[in-house]
Image (spheres, rainbow, N blue to C red):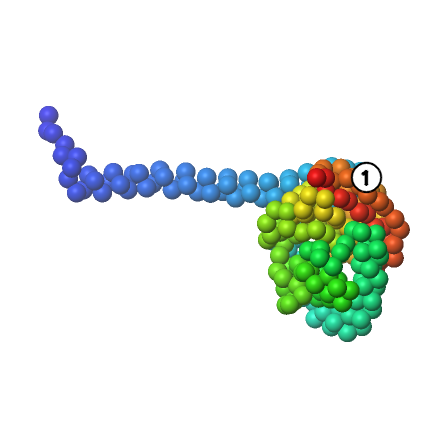
């Protein structure tokens, strides 16, 4: 019988072609599987939080979809003009009184390091600086130096135990409330305070990612903190102030 020379160039080429031929379908299958898994994971994570008093709004198939919708509001030129003109002084005046009250209640002092989450143009930060709390910064998807730096509240760009107080009035924009709260608790110092302004009696605008109907879900989400108080406020469409203190 004639011996076949498998080391010949022709045989090697045929062998390589055969390997490529059977490998391509496998790679395509794995690629499609991973892509599908990613979408499913994102969708599942988005809708995985289950509580009758906190509903995640549907429609966000990917995190990029969610971010783009938030940016559509933040970068809206008409809204930015309003925030910088008609709303600027009015909000600073309201926030100055709000933060002064927190100082009088010993939740805040001139030496406190403060983060304002979702600060947009930074009226909260400006108000803090005007009442003597100079070590304060805002965080939003779109920076507005020097008052607001770029950051995602689902993944804060700060070290653990950085702040004495964190304030936010954009909880309704959190697509992942568990992550939103866990990042606050991670970056708060032991004994630090978180103040949230939320709406329980009316739903947020079309850019909101969740609807909150009671304080109970917040009490469950803040696993490393204790509820200090809840009170009614008039906070630019938000009606409830909730204060938590991180356990030591």
Q: Quadrant of residue 46?
A: top right
Q: Is residue 113 left or right of residue 226?
A: left
Q: Residue 105: give x, y in percent of width and height.
A: 83, 52
In the rendered view, tell whether residue 78 sits above or below residue 4. below
Identify the residue at image location x=61%, y=46%.
160
Q: Is residue 81 left or right of residue 183?
A: right
Identify the residue at image location x=19%, y=39%.
11
Q: Residue 87: give x, y in percent of width and height.
A: 80, 69
The N terminus sits in image quarter: top left
The residue carrying mark 1 is 216
Identify the residue at image location x=17%, y=43%.
9
47 vs 10, nearest the viewer? 47
Q: Residue 26: give x, y in percent of width and height.
A: 41, 38
Q: Is residue 193 visible?
A: yes
29 vs 48, nearest the viewer? 48
Q: Which element carries disc 1, helix, strand or loop?
A: helix
Task: In the displayed orientation, state which residue is furthest to the top.
Answer: 1
Q: Quadrant of residue 217?
A: top right
In the rendered view, tell whether residue 59 sits above or below residue 21. below
Label 1 crowding class (10 Å Cα cut-off): few <14, some 14-19, many 20+? few
Q: Is residue 82 visible?
A: no
Q: Quadrant of residue 219?
A: top right
2 vs 104, nearest the viewer? 104
Identify the residue at image location x=76%, y=44%.
245
């Amino acid at each position: 019988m004639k011996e076949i020379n498998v080391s010949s160039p022709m045989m090697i080429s045929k062998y390589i072609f055969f390997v490529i031929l059977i490998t391509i379908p496998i790679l395509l299958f794995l690629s499609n599987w991973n892509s599908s898994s990613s979408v499913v994971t994102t969708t599942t994570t988005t809708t995985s939080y289950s509580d009758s008093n906190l509903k995640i709004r549907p429609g966000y198939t990917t995190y990029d979809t969610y971010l783009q919708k938030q940016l559509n509001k933040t970068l809206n030129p008409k809204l930015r003009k309003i925030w910088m003109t008609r709303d600027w002084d009015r909000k600073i005046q309201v926030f100055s009184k709000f933060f002064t009250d927190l100082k009088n209640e010993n939740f805040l002092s001139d030496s406190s390091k403060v983060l304002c989450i979702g600060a947009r143009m930074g009226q909260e930060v400006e108000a803090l600086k005007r009442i003597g709390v100079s070590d304060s910064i805002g965080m939003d998807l779109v920076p507005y130096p020097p008052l607001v730096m770029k950051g995602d509240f689902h993944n804060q760009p700060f070290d653990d135990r950085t702040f004495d107080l964190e304030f936010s009035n954009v909880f309704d924009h959190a697509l992942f409330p568990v992550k939103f709260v866990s990042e606050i608790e991670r970056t708060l110092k032991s004994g630090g305070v978180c103040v949230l302004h939320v709406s329980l009696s009316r739903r947020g605008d079309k850019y909101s990612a969740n609807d909150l109907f009671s304080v109970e879900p917040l009490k469950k989400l803040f696993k490393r903190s204790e509820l200090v108080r809840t009170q009614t406020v008039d906070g630019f469409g938000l009606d409830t102030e909730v204060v938590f203190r991180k356990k030591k």
